[in-house]
Image (cartoon, coloured by chain):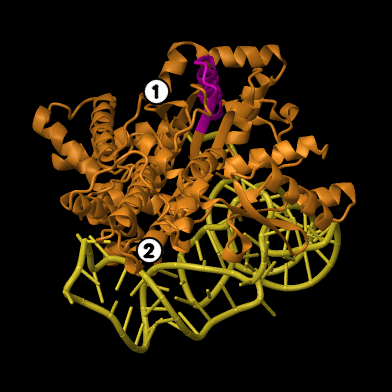
Chain colours: A orange, B yellow
Amino acid sequence: MKNALSSALREILTTLNYPETKIVVQLPKNPNHGDFATNLALQLGGQLGESPRDIAQILADKLKSDYPNLVDSTDIAGPGFINISINKNAIVSQLETVLALNKNYGKSDFGEGKTAQVEFVSANPTGPLTVGHGRGAILGDVISSILEWNGYEVEREYYYNNAGRQMRRLGESVKSRYLELLGENTEFPEEGYEGEYIIEIAQILLDKNGDSLINTADNKVFKEAAESNIFLNIKKTLARIGLKFDTFFNENTLYDSGAIDAVVKTLREKNLIYEKEGATWFKATAAGREQDRVIIKSSGEPTYRLPDIAYHQNKFNRGFDLMVDVLGADHMDAYPDVLAGVEQLDYDSKKVKVIIHQFVTLTENGEPVKMSTRKANYITLDELIDEVGQDVVRYFFIMRGMNTHLNFDMALAKDESDENPVFYLQYAHARLCNILKHAEGQGYNFKKNTDLSPLSLDSEIQLVKFLLEFPNIIERAKDNLEPQTIATYLQSLAGMFHKYYAKERVVTDDKVKTSARLILVKALQIVLYNGLTVLGIHAPERM
RNA sequence: GCACCCGUAGCUCAGCUGGAUAGAGCGCUUGCCUCCGGAGCAAGAGGUCACAGGUUCAAAUCCUGUCGGGUGUACCA
């Protein structure tokens, strides 16, 4: 509907020889301002140096004479807004489209089958997933499905590293706990992992091997036991919130394939590598960065930047049209160097969209809790799911913009779980389903070409116009990769419906009116269902 | 010091990428169940959109500066 108006205006623009201008059509807040409004004349007035109200008059007249079936009336308001009233039948008849498309309503082929890869979570297997990881997990998953709804073919990928210092510490920690369980006198590693789960893993090893590992020189067994055990639990947790990855990418494969060496070699050929103080440096300043960075330490170990560059090269070579990296705010300073490296390898780094989300700050009784996997003072994602359930967890993480520090109080989450906004949405959906079921019991069923003219109340027209916004919302969510856009929209839609429901009765003795209203109800149910589906939240028929 | 993020109702946050009279939830006050589910609805109170300039027909939104909070600023990931 909005799009029809936009293209009509664009048409008029060219026939009248006006300069090309971005066309913005909006739903006015004030119902006195018509069904739709545009500021087009205001913009043109500025460009042409003519009176916006005069231009508005010309545009409005043309709109009315050229599109009599669409436009009922126009009005020039304020400094030069054009307020447009649309033929009510034209609006209401759009409901047919919604019902016809049903579960596909809102999908677009914008991506034209292009491929996208979304990398998220990417936590190394050193401990259980925390609520901090949860935010990135849900964000990445919903962004993935937003892209899918816009016609992309999406691959969800989890990148991890099971080598390196952190993992070595993990192995040492398990070994130490193992020795402790055997009553050996042992000192816990200074930077070791203190979580309970380490002891559990040690116990498993003890049950399986007895004390036969007591004199094992290296801690490979311990490390591997820890890794497989922890990864198993991570995957279990992910499954509990409806997350499934297409690929788990191990950083090690980049070493094995020689990709890492190749990156160094290429950069060296381009004269972007030099040695200093025993380390190997990447000349990031040549790519416009503040300072050069070490990519291979004097110990011979690469820093994370090098494998990250190789990893992105790998992504590019897999041919994705779009790559999304979902990262926590702690990576803020790291990714520009990686992108600079990628750029130097002659890839178009604009294909990589980096999504940075702020941390989840945990408070307990008003006291902020600093989260550290190593120190084990965190709340796990599992515990959170236990408390409030999968749907609430998902909604909680996307109802806020990713740039805000999410303030999470466990006690509050429990107490308010009954009043959580997610129930508001689910209740609206259940209500809609119930009306439909009730109507069915009264012998109503959906027929093509139902007379929709009884849908004439202001509230009904508003409702229809707003639910028809859904495809635009999905597209906007794709543009800003911000799931919150959808959550906010659904919240408003559900609110409008609840108001309508409280005031008007759908199923009455008036058969014609009831049939028309049922179409509206069905369309609302479809939009709510589809919206919740994009967010990965259940849309229950009963609660 | 530098980089990025944030500052909107008592609290938690929206605000359609610059539009018309600033929006919700929670909390507080008061109403609404013979009727499709009251997990809902209606009404009331609550605001210098941190502050100061600038850009223009129009700024919570864009630019600059100031103040306040957060996160980083490693040969850790």
Magenta residues span: A300-324
- Mark closer to the chain start, 1 or 2: 1
User: Relative to A412, does residue A290 appear above or below in the rendering?
Assistant: above
Residues marked 1 and 2, same chain: yes
In the picture, which quadrant includes the N terminus of chain A? top right
Q: Which of the pair A256/A502 is nearer the observer? A: A502
Sort mark 2 into few (<14), some (14-19) or many (20+) by Cα contacts within 10 Å.
Answer: some
Name the residue at the right extreme.
A49
Residue at (70% x, 26% y) in the render? A283
Provide residue A17's location: percent of width, then percent of height. 83, 37
Where disc 2 sits, the SS reads: helix
Where disc 1 sits, the SS reads: strand
Amino acid type shown at disc 1 = Asn
Residue at (51% x, 55% y) in the render? A404
In front: mark 1 or mark 2? 2
Q: How many marks?
A: 2
Provide residue A164's location: percent of width, then percent of height. 42, 28
Residue at (71% x, 14% y) in the render? A270
Provide residue A318's location: percent of width, then percent of height. 49, 16
Residue A327 visible in the snapshot? yes
The residue indicated by pointer 1 is: A250
The residue indicated by pointer 2 is: A500
Amino acid type shown at disc 2 = Tyr
Q: Does the magenta segment cover residue A315? A: yes
Spatial distance from mark 1 to mark 2, Cα to Cα? 53 Å
Residue at (45% x, 52% y) in the render? A464
Q: Chain of mark 2?
A: A
Q: Chain of mark 1?
A: A
Indicate which disc residue A158 carries: none
